[in-house]
Amino acid sequence: MIRFIGSRVLSSLATVFGASIVAFVVLRLLPGDPVRLIVGRLASQQAANTMRQVLGLDQPVPVQYAHYLSSFFRGDWGFSYTVGEPVTTLIVSRLPASAELGLAAFLLAFGGAVVLAPLSIRLGWVDAVVRGLSFLGLGVPAFWLALLLLIVFSQQYHLFPGPEGRLSPETSAPPALTGFYTVDALVSGSFATLADTIRHLILPAVCLAFAPFAFLVRLLRSNLREVSREPFMTVVRSKGVSRWATLVRHALPNAFLPTLTAAGLVLAELLVGSVLIETVFDWPGVGALVVQSIERKDYVVVQAVILLSAVAYVVINLVVDVSYGIIDPRVRLGSSLK
Amino acid sequence: MINASGAEDRPRAPFESLPLGVEGLRYVVRAGLRRPLLTAAGLALLLLILIAVLGPVFWSVSPNRINLLAALQAPSASHPMGTDEFGRDVFARFVRGAQISLAVGAIVIVIGAAWGGLVGLLAGVLGSWRDVLLMRTMDAILAFPPLILAMAVTVGLGTGIVTGALGITIASVPWYARVVRSEVVRVRNLPFVEAAVAAGASRQWILRWHILPAVLPTLVIQAAAAFGYSILALAALGFVGLGAQIPTPEWGAMITDGLQYTLTGQWWIDVFPGLGLLFAATAANVIADGFRDALDPRGEYARV
């Protein structure tokens, strides 16, 4: 067990190391002189040279890389000269918004998949609907769907608020505990704020959840089918368990495992912030931050977010892998025992 | 190798036993009627391709011609998809957008499959430290959310369709590499390869007659699945302003252009490009599924 976890951790570290190299290389391709971007075009050459020394850009490239890597892991992600804040503060302040949206979307996608996959196996018409939805979900551009839903539900029927972010302009945020407005509002007892938060969360979460839902429901459906063919299912059924119960209480838990791995990956992708949905709904998350930083040519922020998202992805992958190994002994003991 | 009847016998590639000519046509039509969804998707994609290719022939309005007097007109006979804020005909821009999306999508999957397939093949065949090195590099690329990686590439190398396509290709290469490598490793361990080695077959022979035929269907399935995704990814880049630049009528960029007008009632600027994307990507996905059913009934491959 220890060896399994150890080998997975080592392999994850190697991936993070590799990812940092990729991020470093890609960002060295950036146009423009970062020194000039900071000191401005009118500053003297001497001032530019001093700034270059301060930033450490006169060092040889491997030294720069070492410095980049070490400062990343120390939590020093640089300073954003366009916003005037350390990048760490900037990202941390926007992370809860993205995380809340990502979590909401994940719950919708995963919950929807878990509910609809068994139904689609038992009921023919549900199967047709689900198949159609899953094809659409993977083919529809999320940002366009967001626009469509905004036009229909927000403008035409006034059911949901428009692209105004997490709360209505007149509502103030609940006292910050976790940064998750839903949790904070619940804890502080302001149910009006809670309702407002949820109203603002629904449309973006639905848009964000559509594609992952399509992916997960297809995966779960095919896994359920596979498990249903196994001999033990015949035994359960012949014991007199109803068709519905055999599906939900025996097939589903077994079909869960491969789906869980995929679900973990989906969660990782969602948490770091969906660039497109956040842009459309004016959501103050990390994804919107990336787009704004690119527009403002604030590449320090872009650099930090890229590496951060890679690290988050690797960490979540590691957790999913290890838990899969804990739950299913065949995985950690090696495929020779399958 | 010669079999009992004296004829040449060798491993057969997929579709090799399909009849040609009228017989083949009848086979295809009957197969198509059995799978209405697949046929519908195929026809939809064909329609889009026809529009892209033949559109400029029959519709001679220029996609970039500005006519401010005719700005923001609803769809009508003279402008089937209306006009945008500069009076440009949306249908002409739609056609040009179709050309861009379909062509770039095709190029991205071909180059991605070629590169990824090569890396996977090398990793699987050469093995040992080269395998580890190659796959670790692939893992490092996979660690990034594909859209963010593509955005970083466009930021680093300059915005535009070409760099956007490059970014998407780079992000897709590890998928091909992984899938191809696992297929190569699987085939490598099969008994008939061992038998071939024992019979004295050279590495090239085994590659050509055993490994390649096993790898190609895998690659084709993955590429087909990635086609829809590539179209959407390019549109996403255009949407955030990092892919196609004004005045290029790429579908994603068109949606951004029309954003402020859509929310005030001029829906046609945004809805049509979006519908184009929807049909192209969904049709591509359905067809990719069909490919998978035809070439790999085990259904092992996860959707990208």
Image (cartoon, helix red, strand yellow):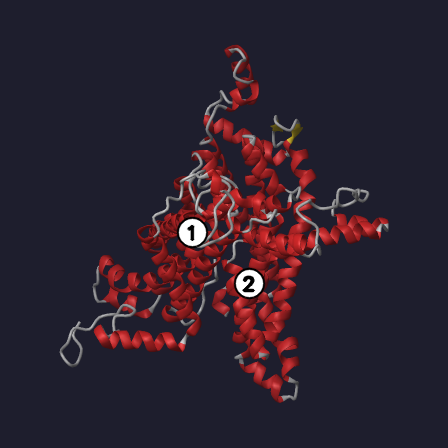
Image quadrant containing the N terminus of chain B = bottom left
Please tell me which residue lies in front, A20 or B273.
B273
**In this rendering, does residue A2 appear at all?**
no
Could you say which disc has been placed on residue B167 in the image? Answer: none
Mark 1 crowd level (few <14, some 14–19, many ≥20, 10 Å Cα):
few
Residue at image position (61%, 25%) is: A81
The CA span between labels 1 and 2 is 39 Å
Q: Secondary structure at mark 1?
A: loop
Left or right, A178 with respect to A262, comes to: right
Q: Which chain letter matches label 2? A: A
Q: Is residue A132 left or right of residue A169?
A: left
**Going 65% across and 64% down the picture, which residue do you hit?**
A111
Whether residue A270 can be seen here: yes
Q: Nearer the viewer, mark 1 or mark 2?
A: 1
Please tell me which residue lies in front, A255 or A9.
Answer: A255
Q: What percent of the width, then of the height, locates residue A212?
A: 57, 59
Callout 1: chain: B
The image shows residue A84, relative to residue B230, as above or below, that is above
What amino acid is at disc 1?
Ser
Instruction: Give the x, y percent position of residue A214.
Output: 55, 63
Q: Nearer the viewer, residue B264 or A93?
A: B264
Q: Is residue A325 above or below residue A87?
A: below
User: Tag 2, which secondary structure?
Assistant: helix
Instruction: Return the mark for residue B78.
Output: 1
Q: Are marks 1 and 2 on the same chain?
A: no
Kindly identify which residue carries mark 2.
A214
x and y percent of residue A180 in the render?
74, 48
Q: CB of mark 1 within 8 Å of CB of mark 2?
A: no
